[in-house]
Image (spheres, rainbow, N blue to C red):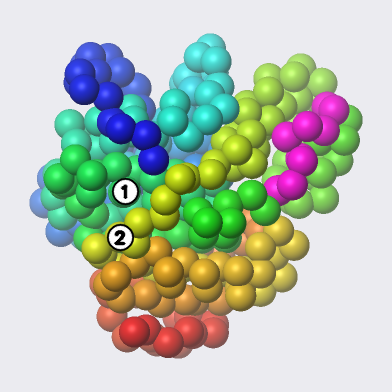
Amino acid sequence: MATPPASPPTTTDVTSWLSCAAPRPAARLRLVCLPYAGAGGSAYRPWAALLGDDVEVWTAQLPGRERRLSDPPLSTMDELAPPLVDAIVARVRKPFAIFGHSMGGLIGYEVTARLVARGGPLPQRLVVSAARPPRDAAPLGSAHRLDDAALTRWLHDLGGIPDEVLADPGLLALILPTVRADLTVVASYRPATVTPLPLPVDAVAAADDPLVSPDEVAGWAACTTAAFSLTVVPGGHLYLHDTPPPLSRLLDGGPATDRAYVEGATR
């Protein structure tokens, strides 16, 4: 983990990194959602309606996609994490939680660790989905080194690229550099130390995920000195395209219910 930058970002920097499409000032909790490789904040916007008035959903806006399409994508965690930390500190009121899927889970750990290092504010909990823990963070092998044709096939097989995009060479040319940069973030993430977080960590694994197994996701238990839970849901690596994880239960920090498909023990 790198030392956070000493000087604060400009207002423009802060506002570009986080977005809240449905402000809810009276919400009991804010949820900061971090994207998987190639995704933008729009992947999580439907969750505002799903979670209701009690939760205000914030989405990370990373360079190289959606409204930041003209910004060059970043390819290291040391480039991504510091501005996200600064944006959370400046814009997200407590209490809040952090959710990250795949690459977003690793970003979530790094952002939370940096918040701990700077003395807070800290999220109530970190929810990670379909991600290996930081000590073994590269489930994608050399996918970032594939040429465009091979990378397109890899994404298609994973279910991460719609057929209409596959049929549009112009769209592919816009998307692939960002996907490759994101995969490079994951492949190159090797924190010198993995410090357990002083807050609960909830992990979600997909039963048929070809990239990371439930047993590997269970390794997140070593990343907390507080409570840990493991939920296994049906589907593949991008299961949340079809069914979101049981967020209401996870954010409440309550006991297992029939909203979870398979439950691990909570210590």
Whether residue 112 sits left or right of residue 94 in the image: it is right
Task: Check disc 1 and give the amino acid type.
Answer: Ala
Label 1 environment density (alpha carbons within 10 Å; few <14, some 14–19, many ≥20): many
Task: Check disc 2 and give the amino acid type.
Answer: Leu
Q: Secondary structure at mark 2?
A: loop
Identify which residue is drawn at 82% across, 50% down: 157
Label 2 environment density (alpha carbons within 10 Å; few <14, some 14–19, many ≥20): some
Residue 113: give its label.
1
Q: Secondary structure at mark 1?
A: helix
Residue 121 rendering spot, x and y as whole percentages: 16, 46
**Residue 25 in view here:** yes
* Vertical position of residue 204 compared to residue 156: above or below: below
Identify which residue is drawn at 54% across, 84% down: 262
Residue 223 rendering spot, x and y as whole percentages: 40, 64
Residue 79 rendering spot, x and y as whole percentages: 44, 26
Contact (CB < 8 A) between labels 1 and 2?
yes
**Residue 162 in view here:** no
Residue 132 lies in quadrant? bottom right
Quickly name the residue at label 2: 197
Camera-nearest residue between 249 and 145: 145
Camera-nearest residue between 246 and 178: 178
Q: Is residue 211 magenta?
A: no
Identify which residue is drawn at 37% across, 84% down: 266
Identify which residue is drawn at 52% across, 69% down: 219
Position of the N terminus by quadrant: top left
Q: Which residues are magenta?
A: 140-148
Whether residue 150 sits left or right of residue 97 in the image: it is right
Position of the C terminus by quadrant: bottom left
Camera-nearest residue between 128 and 171: 128
Please identify the residue farthest to the front as the structure is shown. 192
Q: Earlier in the sequence, mark 1 or mark 2?
A: 1
